[in-house]
Image (tube, rainbow, N blue to C red):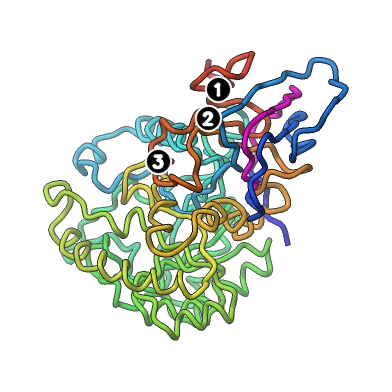
Amino acid sequence: MTARLPLTPAAVDRIRLVGARLIDGTGGAPVDDAEIVVAGDRIAWAGPRRGDVAEERDTRIVDLRGATVLPGFFDTHVHLALDLEADPRQTLAQFPSERALDAAATMRKTLMAGITTARDLSGLDAGYRAAVAAGTILGPRLHLAIQALSPTGGHTDFRLPNGASVHPGPEPEISPIIDSDDDVRRAVRALVRSGADVVKVCTTGGVSSPSDSPHDLGVPERHVRLIVEETARRQGQPVAAHAQGAAGIKEAIRGGVASVEHGYEIDDEGIDLMLEHGTVLVPTLSSALRVPDPARVPGYLYEKKVRWSQIAREHVARAIQSGVTVALGTDAAVCPHGRNLLELGHLVDLGLSPMAAIQAGTINAARLLRLDEHLGTVEAGKLADLVITAVDPLAGIHALADPVSIDAIVQGGRVVKDALRRFPGGVATTSLG
């Protein structure tokens, strides 16, 4: 079953890119002196540079010698409306319009970092997806969870023992709390009605939540199964599990989730289950391995972060080296927005080859989101989402962490970034100007 294709404004130009090195996301050897023809929003040709080609009228030719072309990258775990290190007093004082504009600015920053498709795992509503499709704002193509689900006292219950809310954003319209079978059905149906592309459940507590820990169990296996059954009655939305402690990871996998988010304490039994079930790991190393400034976060969060950062480094490395399928996700909001491709370097540091890390951020992620018919590789017929850089990612993948290293970005055939002004005609703007 395919998923809803996140749209961007339609492109009409025909562009021929020549001379670059092409890493197409399939895992095949790079193609030197490549040629990529973009017709409208789709790729018409991608491969070795051809000889004499009869140029169609109005084709723009772009010389990319010295550059590498890659598929547009995915970040499968972001929270574009949140910033967990922001001053909560400022957040509480904001008007809804200020929060919306801040989220739009974060979306643009994420796109400029090379992320042409993002999965927001709670925080954004479907209006943001529609705004990107209409060209009102520039941002990644969006798949949305709308809200994340957990039991009372679980990871998405942001109430302190005295009942005060410390939710990092506005109070959600759909309750995140599911304690009974009826709660589960009602929540999933409300999420689907609201336009959710994925259902996120929390089978463990977390590092950032105030009243639980990653070892605490959250949504039980039987409720995960019920959620999977309920989504199968709709559009077959995949289920993503926030799961950090070992026991909750295994309950999520046995319950039938498509992906384990974080997976910090995954053990050998959990690795075997992931391999058996084909479950994808989204390890969010950009957040896991980053210990924040203790002055900028609550004490309970800092203490857990120090401990769990080391746990994640050891256990996720073992899973990666065991051959578990990995998709790129950062948990941006827990770590800074706009440096999403830092995750590639972390994946390589923990055992992936640079080529495999690129695939984690392209074709693996596209398959997880059920978008691989359209995205994830640079091949004829696919949508023209491209990242262009002077960096050789097979020799220096860590350099892609700096958005300045991303020279140009094409999204659906539209040039949305062109730092070196290689593309005649300029870059796409929003409908706001």
Rendered residue at 28%/34% (across/down): 94
Rendered residue at 43%/64% (across/down): 351
* Residue 218 appears left or right of 185: left
Q: Nearer the viewer, mark 1 or mark 3?
A: 3
Query: Magenta region: which residues?
Result: 7-24
Rendered residue at 56%/31% (across/down): 67
Q: Which residue is mark 3?
A: 399
First reached walking from the N terminus: tag 3 or tag 2: 2
Q: Residue 389 or 338: which is nearer the viewer?
A: 389
Q: Is residue 214 above or below residue 111?
A: below
Q: Which residue is mark 2?
A: 138
- The numbered disc on residue 333 is none
Residue 13 part of the magenta segment: yes
* Residue 58 appears left or right of 193: right
* Badge 1 amino acid: Thr
- The numbered disc on residue 430 is 1
Local packing at callout 2 (Cα closer than 10 Å; few below 14, some 14-19, many 20+) is many
